[in-house]
């Protein structure tokens, strides 16, 4: 009996270790999207970049889904509901986060993504009755302080407020989209949920591209397309979103969303290190600010004692 229990414990530890490596690999792929987007934004507008990313990513995810689960699963999927969640949550959220990057730097955009667990917990407080804790309160304070330190030298005085608002709304929508996907699309595999919500992201992007091209003449990607651009698009769409999302789903299924989300806290450092390898200088105030943000996010996810939590309970 003890031998069997010991073997199960060893197997569980092995699974946890493998799952964490899988999660690290997923987030590393996700982080490659930020430098790729930065190079694309030098020649393309925001709408063109996000449209190329979302459309190519949906095509890849859909093909993989069709191959693995078959045509019947695809036909019976909750397409309309998934489309609306993908459009309003992930679609608008991704557009705003890329707009934030265009106004600031890839590191600042990555810092915004790293705060997503805080917004997820905030939604649970508002919608699911989760209690405010002392740890969460101080964690949010650190997140705001770290974000200010990291972005202070990168933002001009006239766009600090706009950039901050864009980042907050974008990340909050992403957090809402994640919750809505789980709550509103039961009975579907994680791969299927990803496919139908990605369809909404692609649909919104195509609509925005059409409107901006026809009525406002704001897009320029079609006039500047090279092999280098196509390669960057594939990195941004297939590595930074499509394949990354598949590995992420697998990791979440084994670790749970709570433990897996901790890996998002490392995204700013991954992005800074990638940019450093590509020739950018190491910006110490951003690194220090990123460390404070990550500390705040981790702090906000700690559990307080019941006595301490009672003072901060929501009504």
Image: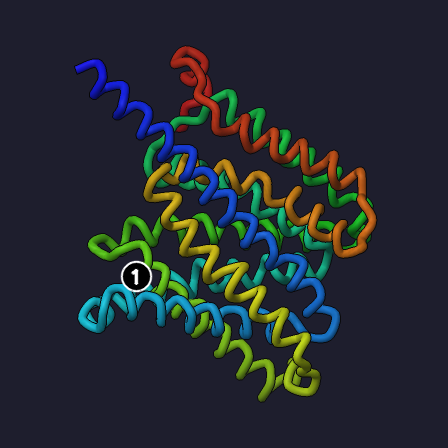
Residue 158: name its quadrant.
Answer: bottom right
Q: Name the quadrant containing residue 20.
A: top left
> Which residue does the image show at 49% across and 39% down from the upper left?
117
- The picture places residue 283, in percent across and down from the top left corner, at 80, 43
Q: Quadrant of residue 203?
A: bottom left
Along the horizontal axis of the image, is 244 left or right of 159? left
Q: Residue furthest front?
A: 3
Q: Position of residue 164 (x, y in %)?
A: 66, 49
Residue under the image location 57 percent in, 43 percent down: 114
The reply, left or right, for residue 299 in relation to residue 22 is: right
Residues 119 and 285: in front is 285
Residue 19 as seen in the image, left or right of residue 213: left
Q: Which residue is mark 1?
A: 192
Residue drawn at x 51%, y 58% as measured from the top left: 93
User: Residue 41, image x and y in percent?
Assistant: 70, 68
Residue 149, position as x, y percentages in the image: 75, 37
Specify whether residue 99 is in view: yes
What SS does tag 1 mark? helix
Q: How is the image coloured?
A: rainbow
204, 2: nearer the viewer:
2
On the rendered image, what quadrant is the C terminus found in? top left
For residue 126, say whether it is visible.
no
């Amino acid at each position: 009996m003890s031998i069997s229990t010991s073997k199960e414990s060893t197997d569980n530890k092995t699974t946890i270790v493998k799952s964490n490596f899988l999660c690290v690999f997923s987030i590393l792929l996700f982080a490659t999207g930020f430098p790729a987007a930065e190079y694309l934004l030098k020649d393309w507008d925001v709408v063109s970049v996000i449209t190329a990313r979302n459309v190519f990513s949906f095509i890849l995810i859909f093909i993989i889904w069709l191959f693995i689960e078959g045509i019947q699963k695809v036909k019976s999927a909750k397409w309309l509901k998934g489309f609306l969640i993908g459009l309003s949550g992930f679609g608008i959220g991704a557009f705003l986060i890329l707009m934030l990057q265009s106004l600031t730097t890839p590191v600042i955009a990555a810092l915004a993504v790293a705060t997503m667990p805080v917004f997820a917990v905030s939604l649970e407080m508002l919608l699911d009755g989760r209690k405010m804790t002392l740890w969460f309160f101080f964690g949010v304070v650190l997140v705001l302080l770290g974000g200010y330190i990291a972005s202070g030298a990168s933002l001009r005085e006239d766009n600090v407020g706009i950039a901050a608002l864009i980042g907050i709304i974008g990340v909050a929508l992403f957090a809402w989209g994640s919750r809505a996907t789980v709550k509103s699309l039961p009975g579907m595999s994680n791969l299927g949920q990803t496919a139908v919500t990605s369809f909404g992201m692609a649909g919104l992007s195509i609509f925005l591209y059409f409107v901006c091209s026809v009525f406002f003449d704001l897009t320029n990607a079609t006039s500047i397309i090279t092999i280098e651009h196509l390669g960057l698009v594939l990195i941004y769409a297939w590595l930074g979103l499509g394949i990354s999302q598949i590995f992420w789903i697998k990791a979440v299924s084994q670790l749970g969303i709570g433990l897996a989300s901790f890996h998002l806290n490392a995204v700013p450092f991954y992005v800074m290190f990638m940019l450093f390898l590509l020739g950018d200088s190491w910006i110490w105030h951003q690194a220090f600010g990123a460390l404070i943000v990550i500390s705040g996010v981790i702090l906000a996810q700690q559990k307080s004692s019941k006595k301490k939590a009672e003072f901060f309970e929501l009504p």
